Image: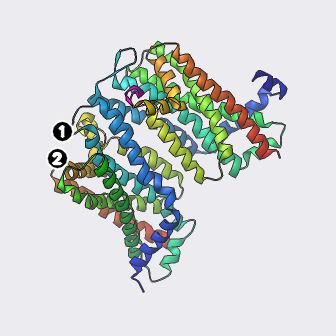
Amino acid sequence: MAHPTIAVFERNMVVYKRLWRTSVFASFALPLLFLVSIGLGVGRYVGDIQGFSYVEWIVPGVLASTAFQMMIGESTYSVMAAFKDYRSAHAAFATRVSIGDLLRGWFLYLVVRVEIAVLVFLVVVAVGVGLSSPWVVMTPVLAALLALATAAPVTAFAAKVDHDSYFELLFRFVMIPATLFSGVFFPVEQLGWLRVAAYVSPLWHAVELCRAAMLGLPTSWPWLVHVGVLVAYGSAGWWWASLTFRRRLQD
Amino acid sequence: MVTLLVARQVSASRVGAVMNRNLGALRSGASYWLVLLAGFFEPLLYLLSIGVGVGALVKNIQMDDGALVPYAVFVAPAMLAASAMNGALAETAFNFFYKMKYSKTFDAILATPVQPIEVAFGELAWAMVRSALYTAIFLVITVMFGLADPWWALAAFPATLLVGMAFGAVGMVVSTLMRGWQDLDLITVGQFSLFLFSGTFAPVGGYPAAVEALVAALPLYHAVELVRGLALGLVSWGLLGHALYLLVMMVAGLWIASRRIQRLLCS
């Protein structure tokens, strides 16, 4: 018998193999559309930033924001469905699977999902724009950090709320503003005092780290602080998720 | 069009009744209001992020007639056109489909003396309320930010109504062609691709000729060009061509939509 954590992971992979078509756009096409429209289209009117062409400069940010959006999208409806519609979480919990297994198997699956998207993205970028720093090998690790920092709190939130209209609000009032104002398309210094909002966003910290890894640029804050913020989001979210899962599974 | 209206004996009060049903739905609770509000914020956030944020890196854009305009001024009318499109499509492509296929609202309506074409008109009228609300607020914000002259903004308003009606009518046709909610994703993909590639964020003049020709066939391109021309006061005969494109889109959309509703719900 496989370890219960692995069993949960495998179950999620089986579902993904059936339904992968629905996420192709968000995982693979959307980032490329952004790179072409904003990076190449608008980039023709932008000079160099920090010694890089505009499209090269936004590549790490688009990579991070794709991982961020993917994780929010994946951790909403499917988590709620596991408790409300299909009750697959209850089914798993009725076996040897513990709450810890459920969460570990789920986050492992999400990290695998992000890595697939990141590797495809890196190959496209390597062919289309080129890679400029050997530190790019760290990108998958950073993507995994961001994935947990995003997916853990959102998973907890999705297990807590009772109605899916909260997700629409999460997409519109958290995900889209965070994507647009976390230093993906322009340096947050331009935001003036509003940059404080970007400091709160895990995406900004991930964008700083990815840009450092992919372009060899220095980070705004010491890199350990950026990593620390992401770890804090991930662990706090994980802890909250174990609480909300427990409450759900006892109903 | 007029003969069609007379031949079918379209009644304004029945069209109004279809439209007013949607007003009643607003009383169902806060969530519809929030979704309505949220749809408005998206183009505004893009204006602030790409228009103002990236605009600080871009400085000026050269128009066809050689005039230089600040980047945010260039992007604002495009976001205005996009918000007219989003407002109309949110009702006619998404909510319309739900009412037709899942909540069976139209089956109930058609059990009364209301005719299919009156459903099409009534739903389009409601979509226009949403679309016009978005664009009116957006125009006020644009003027407040100093991104458009107040008088030219006023001139652009009727153009945004035409944009909303054209997309709203076609949205209903698309609704009637969908097989299930999975197809809604295709609309989202199409809508977002239009949003990114219709000369919204960069002038199409700089693209390779083949790409430029492709973009020139897109409906949102004509909407953006028309609204931008009026909002920036760059009036030329070319604007009539863009308006004509949207007008044809609206009439054809309405005609096909009412036929599709007839076939789907009255047979």
| Residue at screen point 30% across, 50% down | A127
**First in residue order: circle 2 vs circle 1:** 1
| Residue at screen point 36% across, 26% down | B72
Can residue B61 be seen in this snapshot?
Answer: yes
What whole-number distance in Å separates the C-alpha atoms at marks 2 and 1? 8 Å
Percent across and percent down for residue B163 are 57, 27
**A249 left or right of A231 in image:** right
Q: Amino acid at mark 1?
A: Gln
Q: Are marks 2 and 1 in contact (CB under 8 Å)?
A: yes
Percent across and percent down for residue A235 are 30, 64
- Front-most of A223 and A43? A43
Q: Does residue A112 show up magenta in the picture?
A: no
**Colour mapping used in the image:** rainbow
| Residue at screen point 70% across, 46% down | B100
Mark number displayed over residue A50? 1
Q: Residues within 10 Å of mark 2 (few under 14, many from 20)?
A: some
Q: Which residues are magenta?
A: B200-207
**B152 left or right of B27 in image:** left
Up the image or down, A158 lies above or below A104; here it is above
Percent across and percent down for residue B171 are 62, 38
Mark number displayed over residue B133? none
**B116 left or right of B184 in image:** right
Q: Amino acid at mark 2?
A: Leu
Residue on which the image places disc 2: A217
